[in-house]
Amino acid sequence: MAALPPSICTELATQAYVIKKADRRGRFPLVTSMTLDNYFTFDLSNGPIKGISGGAVAHAKGVQTGFVLVGHGRSPIGRSNPYKNDLVLAIRGTNSIYDTSTDLRANISLTEFGARVHSGFNSLFITLQAELAPYLSTVKSGGTVHCIGHSLGGAVASLVADWAKKRFNCKVKLYTFGAPKVGLHDFALKTTNALEPKNIYRCVNGGDVVPMVPVWPFIHAPYNAHEYRLDNHKLLRPWHHLMKYYTENCKAQSWDGINKDISFNSFRRVTLSVQNAQQVQSSVYWMNRLSEALITILREANLALLNSIQSGVANGLNLYDKIAMILADKSLHAMDISSQLSGLLACMLKFAGYGGHKIKELTAEVIRWVFERTLNMINRLAREALNTTEH
Amino acid sequence: MHLCPEVKGRVTLEGKPLVNQKIERSLTLEDEELDHVYTDADGHFSFVAKSLKSKLPGNIFYQTVVRIIVDMEFEGEIYNLWIGFQHGLKTPSEFKKHLLKLNAELSAEECKHHLVNPKKTSEEHYVSSICRWN
């Protein structure tokens, strides 16, 4: 099963945005590039696959908009098309008032396979399932299902890919651009094993903060494995979340021409000192180091707690409060972690814009306050990039 | 933000101007906005530029797509003079250029046109139209 070229994937992720609403004549016009035309046909006579995104209000109103553009491999005469038996599902991201409430509420819900995922992404996915099923159950033998999406669309594409593989036993490839994290460790691990890391093309721009949310214990698939790093930007640039920056950065002819990097690994041992705080910047790099350093401390201080967090047993809104309480209670630690913890908290404060503050005591209140500031900063940065209708 | 630049064109059938023909323009950001004009004695028509004061796209993070359609109905058939998509807040320069010469001969096939900004070749668009630009 051949991967789609990067430029075809960015075009599909972009085209998914134009099929949101019909015109007054009931048409969903689509104008694709000649290259895309050579490979796939898009029949929109019955419209795109529609879904309901957003909170209870949107669901109650039943506000349906186009979400998935479906393409079928073309069988050209006298020419070969490596994708002729394939199906493409291009899913759009947030683009309206109804969509934005889906974004950052990190509530957990279960997939039908029992894995823990973000309930906002899952509830949108569930509204698409009935219409997607007939396509997935009729994929030609030898055919591959290509799931593609930008932003929220990438998160939903991940759920579609997981489902297509497990429920319909399709061959699946997943391509995401600036997608947030979909689920906890169990989902990331299971979907990585089901799809295999080589079939997951998770693309990020260096300045895009959206792939960093929701924060750990949410984690990306492929689990502790590579992402495609499209540029070398180190500092956050919220607008680099826009699809056009992904398109510009993804002109390579093949995936081999794009840098691969493991930016986060939950087994990487990271210890931070108070002195490290001077180097901390508002960057994806530092967000990953802060998470890894926290995981390192938890692993060394209280492995049972780490395991229960990662398996999703301990969660909820007060998860970080719980971590703060346990980190402050020395009797629960297997070893002395106070210098590591001071280092982590100093680095977190610098990240959160409180570089001048000095931490005197490692009480639960202090630790909780630092966590809160840090999480607020990450969420503020992500909202800037995602929450498009507030201004 | 720009929804649509000025549009000028002419409609003919077998080379003869179509007189008093209704030409419709549909612009969709969130909601479809419609207006229409009629061709003159020589088949000419024009639309003024249209912009929008919306709170939505004022934010640069909004994934802006404007669907621009100019079409007409003649003897029960729909003819598309322009189907194009503006991604972002600015009208592509090639859209401005081509929408000023929307010369449609109804007997021509609708086909896809690849528009590339000669000054910035990474700026390329595909539009669908029965018009020809030579």
Image (cartoon, coloured by chain):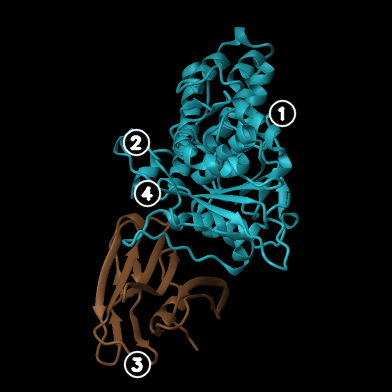
Chain colours: A cyan, B brown
- Numbered disc in front, either 1 or 4: 4
Query: What amino acid type is highlighted by mark number 1?
Result: Phe
Look at the numbered disc 3 and give the secondary structure of its residue.
Answer: strand
Count neighbours of disc 4 (C-alpha within 10 A) and say few if under 14, some if 14 to 19, many if 20 or more.
some
Find the distance from the CA under tag 2 to the CA under tag 3. Answer: 53 Å
Identity of the residue furthest to the front in this view: B75
Look at the numbered disc 4 and give the secondary structure of its residue.
Answer: loop
Query: What amino acid type is highlighted by mark number 3?
Result: Lys
Same-chain status of marks 2 and 3: no
- Numbered disc in front, either 1 or 2: 2
**Residue beneath the point at 55% across and 35% down:** A182
Could you say which is closer to the camera, residue A279 or residue A307? A307
- Numbered disc in front, either 2 or 3: 3
**Residue beneath the point at 71% across and 28% down:** A267
Find the distance from the CA under tag 4 to the CA under tag 3. Answer: 45 Å
Q: Say the numbered circle drawn on residue A267.
A: 1
Q: Say the numbered circle drawn on residue A96.
A: 4
The answer to which of marks 1 and 2 sits earlier in the sequence is 2
**Residue beneath the point at 46% across and 82% down:** B108
Query: What amino acid type is highlighted by mark number 4?
Result: Ser
Could you say which is closer to the camera, residue A345 or residue B102? B102
Apparent side of residue A308 relative to residue B52 in the rendered image (left or right):
right
- Numbered disc in front, either 4 or 3: 3
Disc 2 target residue: A59
Measuring from the top left, give residue A317's x and y in whole percent. Answer: 45, 23
